[in-house]
Amino acid sequence: ARGWVDKENLKQYQSMKYDDDGNLVKKYSLQYLLGQCKDFQDEVTQLEFVCKMQGARAIITPKYHAELAGEGIEYTWGFLKSIYRRFPLAKKKGKANFEALLAKILSR
């Protein structure tokens, strides 16, 4: 529909197409082509959408990037889980109880 796919050469297209030297062949790389579409650039992930609906914001960082997604988040999650585990099971059962407990823990 956008005129980017050559219907005569459909077999050339791959998710990411590289030439013999390891260079990206943009003309036949579907991920690259979709990434150039404005509507795909502005698309939010399902996680970002759900967080926004709950009044929160998800910050997506690159996977395996030590400085951005490294130890800081691990310490934070570990700390929050240790607090969560201290509460009795009765406070965790049911959606309302669970959400109230999470709000209490996250407000620290």
Image (tube, grey):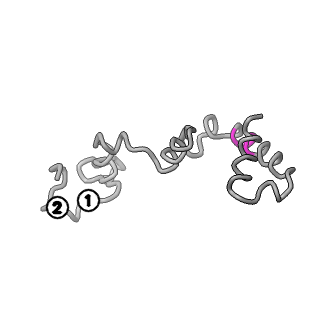
- Quick one: which residue is furthest to the front in this view? 96
Taking the image as shown, residue 82 lies to the left or right of residue 51, namely: right
The residue labelled by disc 2 is 9
Asked whether residue 69 is in view, the answer is yes
Please name the amino acid that badge 2 sits on: Asn
Q: Which residues are magenta?
A: 73-77
Q: Residue 25 versus residue 63: which sits nearer the camera?
A: 63
**Does 74 lie within the magenta span?**
yes
Residue 106: name its quadrant.
top right
The structure residue drawn at horizontal position 59% and vertical position 45%, both measured from the top left corner, is: 64
Please name whichever residue, 55 or 49, is drawn nearer the observer in this view of the structure.
55
Q: Residues within 10 Å of mark 1 (few under 14, many from 20)?
A: some
Task: Please name the residue shown 43% across and 44% down the image.
Answer: 44
Image quadrant in which the C terminus is located: top right
> Can you identify the residue that label 1 sits on?
13
Instruction: Work out whether 103 lies above or below 6.
Output: above
Mark 1 and mark 2 in contact (Cβ < 8 Å)? yes
Please tell me whether mark 1 sits on a helix, a strand or a loop: loop
Q: Secondary structure at mark 2?
A: helix
Q: Nearer the viewer, residue 26 or 44?
A: 44
Residue at horizontal 29 percent and vertical 40 percent from the top? 38
Find residue 103 and report its horizontal and vertical position in percent.
Answer: 71, 42
Q: Quadrant of residue 7?
A: bottom left
Which amino acid, mark 1? Answer: Tyr
For image coordinates 63% across by 39% down, the residue present is 66
